[in-house]
Image (cartoon, helix red, strand yellow):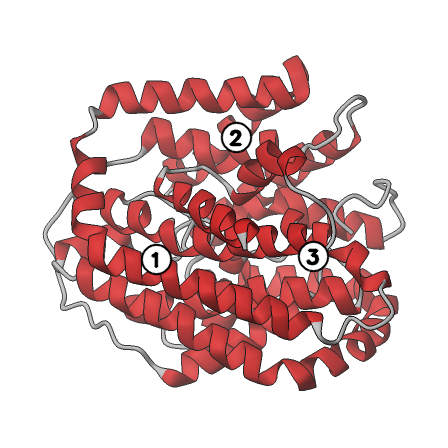
Amino acid sequence: MKELLLGQGLGALGLLPFVHTNLLLQLTRHFIGEGIPLAVFAVAVSFSHLVFQTVPSLFLFLPSEAHGMNIVPYQEIARAKKTAVALRIILTTFLLALLLSIALHPLIQQLLPIAYEMLKPHMVWMLPLLILLFFASETSMKSLACGMLVFFLAGALGNVAFTVPGIREPLFPLLTGLFALPAVLMETRTPQSQATETLQLKLKKSLVVGGVLAGAFSVLFPALSVSVLAGILLLFLEKKSGEFIVLASSIASSKLFYEFVAALTIEKGRSLAAVWIVPLASLPNTTPLVPFIALVALTATGFASATVLLAHGKLASVLQRIPRTAFRIILLTGLLCLAYLFEGTTGVMISVSAGAVGALPILLNTRRSHAAGALLVPAAMHFAGISLDGILL
């Protein structure tokens, strides 16, 4: 099917840092049909991109959608010379988590509508509770204070972005500024110090199961990112670097799959790709669609994983040989031009303002996942009765 092949190939652009799945989908939407072909394309792009983005994350120390915002200690892995081992563990976790998610989906698909109806009236306090749990994962008062500062500044900016007149799609300029621009301008290419302890990397099955369950039920809530979920779960785990990798990978794979399941069951699109699937929920019988989506997801993930395993050395070598300064200038210019293309001068202003907020975690040495306040604060405000026109919900 051409949509599968096209989505698979387009997802390979995850090799380019900060080329978000939403950007790929927005740029290609008008070239794809409707209904099932559109669903195939969206699923293939999403899972292929999930795999390919691992290469710049591990070899260039740049955050990604699945392993971003300080969840995976890239430089610690490089210092221990275990990048190849980490890559194999991540890809294996993606596949295991996806297989387990598919195996559990008949049960969870039945539970999601029931759970959503039960939780919906209580979202006004449940979402703030999750935010408090996320803050509770901080290890010191200093990191807590810095994290709260970043979180609420990002939340104020998100509130502005979602309510400013004339903005059709605030997510691209907002997220580009919060995460991409600071990393482009302030990222480091090589490890800064020698390893001080032995890094243990091991695929723990219990973490895979926990990540799958967390990813599955995360779709009941708006704006919960992989890094926020991992931060909450780490309250109940030893904070070992090797565990971050498995936990974040299993959450990312499960969450992505169940975003499509949720689109067909509770008709909530928690990502742009899932939003495209929501209209299919109105079909007379959507039950056979989930196994079909699962097959596409497995095909895309399996093919992309095999490609990355076979060619990651050459791919990383090519990326590392690109002149760093020129690459950063081109990438920065391209991101701002796209913000202007999508949302005009206002989009550029949002990106630049978000970039200033997004730089704070790096300067304050706190987790970049606190910038998720740009989505969580507006979502909490919505459920508290402060209308944001239902954006993201």
Question: What amino acid is found at the position of numbered circle 3 in the picture?
Answer: Ile
In the rendered view, tell whether residue 153 sits above or below residue 246. above
Question: What amino acid is found at the position of numbered circle 2 in the picture?
Answer: Gly
Question: What amino acid is found at the position of numbered circle 1 in the picture?
Answer: Val
Q: Quadrant of the N terminus?
A: bottom right
> Residue 321 occupies which quadrant of the picture?
top left
Residue sticking out furthest to the top: 345
Read off the residue under disc 1.
Answer: 72
Tell me which label, 2 or 1, sits earlier in the chain: 1
Q: Residue at x 41, y 55 (%)?
A: 67
Q: Position of residue 52 (x, y in %)?
A: 37, 51
SS state under label 3: helix
In the rendered view, tell whether residue 283 sits above or below residue 75. below
99 left or right of 392? left
> Residue 39 occupies which quadrant of the picture?
bottom right
Tell me which label, 3 or 1, sits earlier in the chain: 3
Q: Mark yes or no: residue 229 visible.
A: yes
Q: CA distance from mark 2 to mark 1?
A: 21 Å
Read off the residue under disc 2.
Answer: 177
Q: How many numbered marks appear?
A: 3
Read off the residue under disc 3.
Answer: 36
